[in-house]
């Protein structure tokens, strides 16, 4: 090999090493960026401002089913959000175990396949621009509610609609009762 060929080979190797070094710096730069806990079904990015719990406001999650579900689902539980604001919903079985969580924006509905049995619906609602994730919910604007326990038989479908009822004595929910955060 001539000296000129050896020089070109060295320049090519040096060029490859330099390019790999740039990728290493790029990866290092991005890996040091702050990391946020992300739900499995959607990206949550930081949003600006917010008051209340001190937790930062985040974007509402993508997708409706956030966690859980049923392997054997011969029956169905349909939830309709007519509150005028989003709701984070828990489907709880008779043993108190959370079987699924669903995020419903205002006006959305979701049908969850379930096994026959008794279930209670618990939800927290608040303004969508105050969403702080699954630990702080809607901050100080969070309104916690629980619906009565209902039995869903084999090959049956139960529909639960969330809406506010206004009366002279104040507002309340249809078939729901206000609960504390620790009951949620």
Image: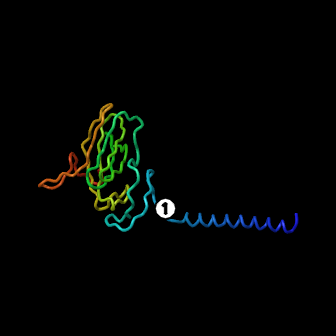
Q: List the residue tagged with mark 1.
A: 35
**Which of the 4 image quadrants contains residue 15?**
bottom right
Looking at the image, the residue that sits furthest to the right is: 2
Left or right placement of residue 177 versus residue 11 in this view? left
Looking at the image, the residue that sits furthest to the left is: 168
User: Residue 71 location, x and y as percent?
Assistant: 42, 37
Label 1: which secondary element:
loop
Up/down of 72 relative to 30, above or below: above
Residues 11 and 48: in front is: 11
User: Residue 52 location, x and y as percent?
Assistant: 31, 65
Left or right placement of residue 135 versus residue 168 in this view? right
Total tally of numbered discs in the picture: 1
Looking at the image, the residue that sits furthest to the top is: 154
Residue drawn at (20%, 47%), measured in percent from left and top? 174
Quadrant containing the N terminus is bottom right
User: Residue 181 location, x and y as percent?
Assistant: 29, 54
Circle 1 crowding by C-alpha within 10 Å: few under 14, some 14–19, many from 20: few
User: Residue 31 location, x and y as percent?
Assistant: 55, 63
Residues 2 and 180: in front is: 2
């Amino acid at each position: 090999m001539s000296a000129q060929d050896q020089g070109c080979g060295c320049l090519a190797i040096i060029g490859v090493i330099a390019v790999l070094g740039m990728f290493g710096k790029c990866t290092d730069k991005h890996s040091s960026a702050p990391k946020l806990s992300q739900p499995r079904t959607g990206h949550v990015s930081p949003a600006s401002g917010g008051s209340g719990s001190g937790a930062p406001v985040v974007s509402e999650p993508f997708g409706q089913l956030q966690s859980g579900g049923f392997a054997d689902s011969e029956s169905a539980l349909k939830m309709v959000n007519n509150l005028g604001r989003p709701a984070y919903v828990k489907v709880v079985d008779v043993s108190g175990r959370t079987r699924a969580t669903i995020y419903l924006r205002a006006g959305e509905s979701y049908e969850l396949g379930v096994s026959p049995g008794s279930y209670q619906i618990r939800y927290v609602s608040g303004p969508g621009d105050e969403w702080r994730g699954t630990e702080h919910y809607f901050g100080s604007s969070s309104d916690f509610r629980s619906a009565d326990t209902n039995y869903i038989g084999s090959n049956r479908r139960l529909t639960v609609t969330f809406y506010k009822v206004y009366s002279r004595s104040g507002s309340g929910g249809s078939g729901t009762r206000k609960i504390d955060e620790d009951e949620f």
